[in-house]
Amino acid sequence: MTNWQAATGSGTVVSIVAGATAGSQDVGVVVAGGQVAHVVVSLGGLPLPLAVGDLIDVNVARSPGFQFGLTLTITRNGLTALYMSTAEDSLAAPPVPLAIGAALCSTAETCGLLSQNALLAFDGATMVTIGQGQALDVGAFRVFNDGTRLQAEAPRTCADWGGTFFRVAIARRMP
């Protein structure tokens, strides 16, 4: 899921084809001026909740100066169709509230102790625990946990290193 790029703006989906990397999809979007922008996404096996002809808004939020800080949101008819984040902290609110769950394993790295964690997703009063590499339905969405990592101790031993982040894809389930 970490290999995506996008242009920010609005437009109509004109093509959906296989992307250059395994499991990725390249969505062509006609934007202002008639140019075609491309949004390349890899959803860990989740179905892409878009179709040719959809009018969508694409927004990419970037964390300044931090390598893991990207969040992509695609809305259709005012509703979130797709949300992807590789951010240390959520840069745009996900359509499903998320939290870091229990540690699944831990490892000592050069820059500190890290744990790989389950992802907690909430739908109203219901909490769902999603393991690493798993996808589960949460309300109107399918949530994929591509990696949830937590810096398990402080202080950090590397000043430029952020150890806590989510890699998550959330796709609206198609009727």
Image: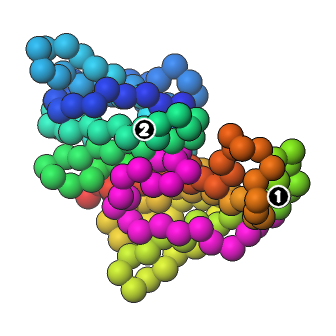
User: Three-letter amino acid code at disc 1?
Assistant: Leu
How far across and how far down the image is residue 172, in percent?
33, 55
Q: What stretch is highlighted in magenta?
A: 84-105
- Label 2, secondary structure: give it: strand
Residue 13: within the magenta?
A: no
Tell me the distance, in whole angstroms, between the alpha carbons under discs 1 and 2. 26 Å
Q: List the residue tagged with mark 2.
A: 62
Q: Is residue 21 above or below residue 143?
A: above
Q: On the picture, is 75 further left or further right than 42?
A: left
Q: In this view, does 103 lie above or below 150?
A: below
The chosen color scheme is rainbow
Quadrant of the rendered image containing residue 50: top left
How far across and how far down the image is residue 56, in percent?
19, 38
Q: On the picture, is 114 further left or further right than 19?
A: right
Q: Which quadrant of the rendered structure holds the C terminus?
A: bottom left
| Label ID, residue 167 | none
Quadrant of the rendered image containing residue 140: bottom left
Residue 85: within the magenta?
A: yes
Q: Is residue 150 above or below residue 120?
A: above
Q: Nearer the viewer, residue 90 or 56?
A: 90
- Label 1, secondary structure: give it: strand
How far across and how far down the image is residue 129, in percent?
58, 73
Q: List the residue tagged with mark 1.
A: 113
Residue at 52% from the left image edge and 19% from the top image edge = 20
Q: Is residue 3 visible?
A: yes
Quadrant of the rendered image containing residue 55: top left
- Residues tagged 1 and 2 counted as in contact (Cβ below 8 A): no
